[in-house]
Amino acid sequence: MQVNSSVPFIQMEKIEFGYKRSQRIIPGVSGSFWCHHCTAIVGANGSGKTTLGKLLAGILKPWSGKVWIQKESTTQLRLGQIGQRVGYVFQEPDRQLFAPSVREELLFVARLQGMLDSAVEGKAQQMLAEFGLDHVADSFPHSLSRGEKQRLALAAVLMQEPGFLILDEPTTGLDKERRQQLTEHVQTLKAAGVGFVIISHDDRFVNNNADRVLTMSGGEIVDDSHP
Ligand SMILES: Nc1ncnc2c1ncn2[C@@H]1O[C@H](COP(=O)(O)OP(=O)(O)O)[C@@H](O)[C@H]1O
Ligand SMILES: [Mg+2]
């Protein structure tokens, strides 16, 4: 998709959020995220990384403040519209796999978005090869290994060619070789202009991929560095 790289792709403005009224998890956080960049979010378990990622992807809506995706507020965009701009891969990829086969998983959303069958099938075939899923193309997604599910979830999100990707702990369940391949995917997509937020406690993966590292503690960004 066409992007203007001088303006942030996603902006958060004083966002405040909690799962229940009595417990505020994100106390009012601001920040900007650009295309062509990879921002890692690091921090201890429970520091609010996943919650912030879901707010950025419009899956959760802030109590107050705004998340802007290309200047439009996530409270005004439908999830389908957001999915064409921002792809999100869950920490537990099981949660986003629902088709009867791996191939169908790749075809489903793109068809829903009105892409031509011939174009969709060609692209799905290319994804199967690129993500090493050819041999399981007709398998039930939930029967795959953790790493295969992770790759399928990413490939399915990429079918929509979003301008920005949010990946929550993407190296969980990946061996060294697959981690290296994921780094190559990230670098290729980034060179093509895609922006990333990668939530990870995998130091080596962060060092290899991040242009910027945000550290979270108690729901706040306590450090913003460019290594
Ligand atoms: N669905 C939920 N309902 C209630 N509390 C939640 C939920 N998800 C996360 N939390 C709480 O929000 C806080 C931040 O969690 P999370 O964003 O998952 O952190 P991280 O990804 O950094 O481990 C934690 O205290 C966690 O217990
Ligand atoms: Mg998490």
Image (cartoon, helix red, strand yellow):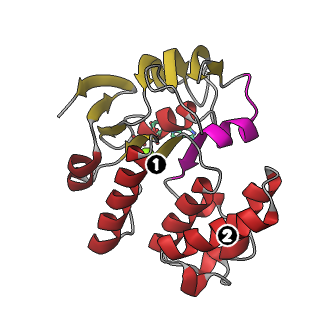
Mark 2, residue position: 122
Residue at 65 percent of width and 83 percent of height: 139
Q: Is residue 87 magenta?
A: yes
For the C terminus, the image quarter is: top left
Left or right for 40, reference 156: left
Between residue 180 and residue 89, name the one nearer to us.
180
- Kindly tell me whether residue 205 is visible in this rendering: yes
- Secondary structure beneath dot 2 equals helix
Residue at 50 percent of width and 64 percent of height: 150
Between residue 209 and residue 24, name the one nearer to us.
209
Q: Which residues are magenta?
A: 76-90
Q: Is residue 123 magenta?
A: no
Mark 1, residue position: 167
Between residue 107 and residue 147, name the one nearer to us.
107
Residue at 39 percent of width and 37 percent of height: 36
- Secondary structure beneath dot 1 equals strand
